[in-house]
Image (cartoon, rainbow, N blue to C red):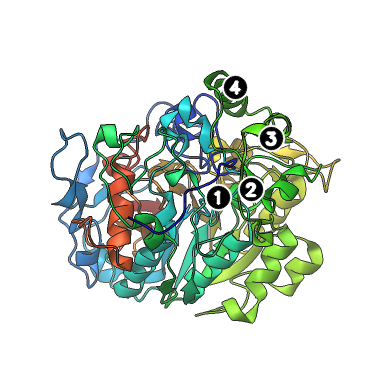
Amino acid sequence: MSRIRSAVTAVDRRSFLAVAGAVSLSAGIGAAVGTAGGSGSASAAPAHTAPGTAGPTTPAATPTPTPTGPSADRTTLHSLAAPRDRSAAFRRIGDGPGWRRVVREQFASAKSGREDRRTVLSSFVQLTDLHVTDVQHPVRTEYVRSESPGAWRPHEALSVAGAVSLIEQVNALGTGPATGAPLAFAMTTGDNTDNNSLCELDWYLTLMSGGLVTPNSGDPQAYEGVQNSGLRMYWHPEDSAPDSDKRLGYPRIDGLLEAALRPVRSPGLALPWYSTVGNHDSLASGAYADRTGFLAEFAVGTRKLYDLPDRDAAILLAQISQGDTADGGPLISLLRREKRRMRTITADPRRAPFTPLQYLTAHLDSAHTGAGPVGHGYTKANLASASLDYTFSMGENVTGVSLDTTDHGGHFTGSVGTGQLDWLERILKEHSGGYVVLFTHHNSWTMGNKRPDPARPGEARHNGDEVVALLRRHRSAVAWINGHSHRNVVLPHGSFWEISTASHIDFPQQARVIEIADNKDGTLSLFTTLIESAAPRETDFTDLSQSGLASLYRELALNAPGSRQDLAGLSDARNTELLLRR
């Protein structure tokens, strides 16, 4: 048994990104609308219909033989993690058959011989929704799990080990699996952290740049989260007493909590990498713009709420799911009145929320440069203008644009301000003779929140449809790449492709390689290839090494109660060749 002492109860703040109806859920309350996931977890995407066209635009996909490029055997083209017995209560993972590449020709026909003519314009990796998580954070809301099983994930304590294993896989690729061109950079598209806390920001930047991460806060010698609290709605891995997850087949694993808090060594990305911000990186629980300061003070304090009467949990869950609590009022009221139910924990100033200025400053810190560039896209100009938007070169004649879609007025869905939309249009015009790729956290169907930005109260906000319309007006726009919904989706929008990639907190825990090539026949090809972490697929419950924890992270995610099983997306949203006429 672990020597770590029993936890004292607390309030979870990570579990807050519920979304109503077809919109997405944020990273802790996913199951409120049928998902398990992190910020903007698994929302329903619109059908494959391009705006301004009649009827479906996805004809029967044309499968092609699996490419055998230099790195193909390290991707889901070759094989993937899959349940060995889908009927088992607790499904064990093994090797599954790979996914073939699907050619999509909505905008242009695939001409023979293009593989011999093409020139690669850009080759890179997209990581999204890592949700590096401090599982002991006081503002997390695990206690609503009594009403929604997916509101707390049993594997979250292993997010750091899982992220390291993904970084190891990216480093091992070296080249694009479709073209063989060297990978030029990596881009994270937001929700890099989970609770908007300083310690998570430090862990994330150290993971990406290289170094030692100790994923523990509060008492340096003790775990103070929910998994040894004695409350049986959580998985208690280190005892044999029944709980809600053991009844579903979750195992007993002695020493797991102690292992989860051990230092983890990250090699850092060997590629230059860039960073885009998400709602969990900007708002309390990914949803709340608390201007009273209460949640910030509570985050660094000595009290945490672990459980709640079912009726109160149901009320809070409904308030979150409705998305009308942008200022955090209901949560603050709950924490003020439930002091007697709280337990004492160790205070930690590193749990304080970080501001956009602190986010920028941390990226510009030379300690986090790693493979570069300095600032990872952000510059001193961003500090001066208090902006999280920037451009960068992706290759000859290809410009990347990173745009902050978080609504700083609060909410887990997104939008952009008029100033941002005007700036994006100027970039598109300036590069009319080349190609532009937009990177954001939110996708087009989760940008419907038009609450004013407190810093710009008179400025209008704009939704995803307006961004799509702008991109369609400029032939330089070839792709919009994002995350947030924790599901693989690829949509045609008349003249460009929207590519949304699954998270690395919910199974199947994937990232995506994207290669852009000029076929020298009036068309471009955008190749998308999904990758998994380097962790062994077969899990050994007695292996609590760094790689063993990464394997366990994946298998526990597969079995997480309340999790969606369709996050891999449709076959034409996985490994693809997306044609564009140019």
Quadrant of the frame with the C terminus: bottom left
Identify the disc placed on residue 405: 2
Secondary structure of the residue carrying numbered label 1? loop
Quadrant of the frame with the N terminus: bottom left
The x and y percentages for residue 194 are 55, 51
User: Mark 1: few, some, or many residues within 10 Å (few <14, many ≥20)?
Assistant: many
Residue type at mark 2: give it: Thr
| Residue 522 visible (yes or no) | no
Does 466 sit left or right of 37 as displayed? right
Identify the disc placed on residue 127: none
Q: How far is disc 4 from disc 2 in space, using C-alphas?
A: 32 Å
Whether 251 is drawn above or below 524: the answer is: above
Pointer 3: what residue? Answer: 339
Residue type at mark 3: give it: Lys
Q: Which is more foreground, mark 4 or mark 2?
A: 4
Q: Which residue is drawn at the image coordinates 55% and 54% (left, top)? A: 190
